[in-house]
Image: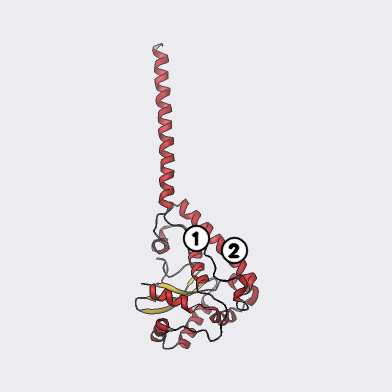
């Protein structure tokens, strides 16, 4: 083999080897990145009731559209953003504690996924004289004076939230607090001035009630008390730190 050909052969071999090394490294990086991102993602919550079980408070069509289209999109888009931004967190609370560092896509959609999952979990079939009991009832009375005072304060928070958003009952230390957040923000986010661990949530976006109530948000809030699963709210109260 001539010297020139030998040099070209060696040079070509080194180039090929370098290319393979870079390709393998890129492949390995992708695998590692996937492993990093696989530790947390949002799952589509399974409802414990049918779409029509909440009628007449929330009609079946509203529930179906709300769950399948709005909520489904939040979960899908939140998980896309987690992968796109190479987010490594242990759970939603960990994610929200640093949400100001991430994109608007992740903030809005992860909030939507979490908020709705909580909202679905605290609903049940309508029941008259639907009241909290046990430790939760004691905490409500201690924090607000009475259940009626609590309802009135929560009603005001939900009704006065301008535009789209949420009303919340949160646990903050040994106290309960009521507040609201805009859009899909929640009290676990580091961008929210209202903080605490959510145990009760009311969605006051118009898509949550408009088919049945149109612009009558007050009626929607008034009727919502009949479908609260207070046992689930108390479970969240007991387990929240």
Nearer the observer, 1 or 125: 125
Query: Label 2, label 1: how many angstroms apart (C-alpha)?
Result: 13 Å
Q: Position of residue 106 (x, y in %)?
A: 48, 58
Residue drawn at (59%, 63%), measured in percent from left and top?
68
Residue drawn at (43%, 70%), measured in percent from left and top?
187
Instruction: Identify residue for label 2.
Output: 68
Residue drawn at (48%, 65%), measured in percent from left and top?
114
Instruction: Specify whether 241 is left or right of 116.
Output: left
Quadrant in the rendering for residue 236? bottom left
Instruction: Specify whether 235 is left or right of 69.
Output: left
As drawn, the label of residue 29 is none
Q: Position of residue 80 (x, y in %)?
A: 50, 54
Q: Position of residue 134 (x, y in %)?
A: 41, 83
Quadrant in the rendering for residue 54? bottom right
Residue drawn at (50%, 58%), measured in percent from left and top?
78
Nearer the observer, 114 or 51: 51
Q: Position of residue 93 (x, y in %)?
A: 40, 64
Nearer the observer, 30 or 230: 230
């Amino acid at each position: 083999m001539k010297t020139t050909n030998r040099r070209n052969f060696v040079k070509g071999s080194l180039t090929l080897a370098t290319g393979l090394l870079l390709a393998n490294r890129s492949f390995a990086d992708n695998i590692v990145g996937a492993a990093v991102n696989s530790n947390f993602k949002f799952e589509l919550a399974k409802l414990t009731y049918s779409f029509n079980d909440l009628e007449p408070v929330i009609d079946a069509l509203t529930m179906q559209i709300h769950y399948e289209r709005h909520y489904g999109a939040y979960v899908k888009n939140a998980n896309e953003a987690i992968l796109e931004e190479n987010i490594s967190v242990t759970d939603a609370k960990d994610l929200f504690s640093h949400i100001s560092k991430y994109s608007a896509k992740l903030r809005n959609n992860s909030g939507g996924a979490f908020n709705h999952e909580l909202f679905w979990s605290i609903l049940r079939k309508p029941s008259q004289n639907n009241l909290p009991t046990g430790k939760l009832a004691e905490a409500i009375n201690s924090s607000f004076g009475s259940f009626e005072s609590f309802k009135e304060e929560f009603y005001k928070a939900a009704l006065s939230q301008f535009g789209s958003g949420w009303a919340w009952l949160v646990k903050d230390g040994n106290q309960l607090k009521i507040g609201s957040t805009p859009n899909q923000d929640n009290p676990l986010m580091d961008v929210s001035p209202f903080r605490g661990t959510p145990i009760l949530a009311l969605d006051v976006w118009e898509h949550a009630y408009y088919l049945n109530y149109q612009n009558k948000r007050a009626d929607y809030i008034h009727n919502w008390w009949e479908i609260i699963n207070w046992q689930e709210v108390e479970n969240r109260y007991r387990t929240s730190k």
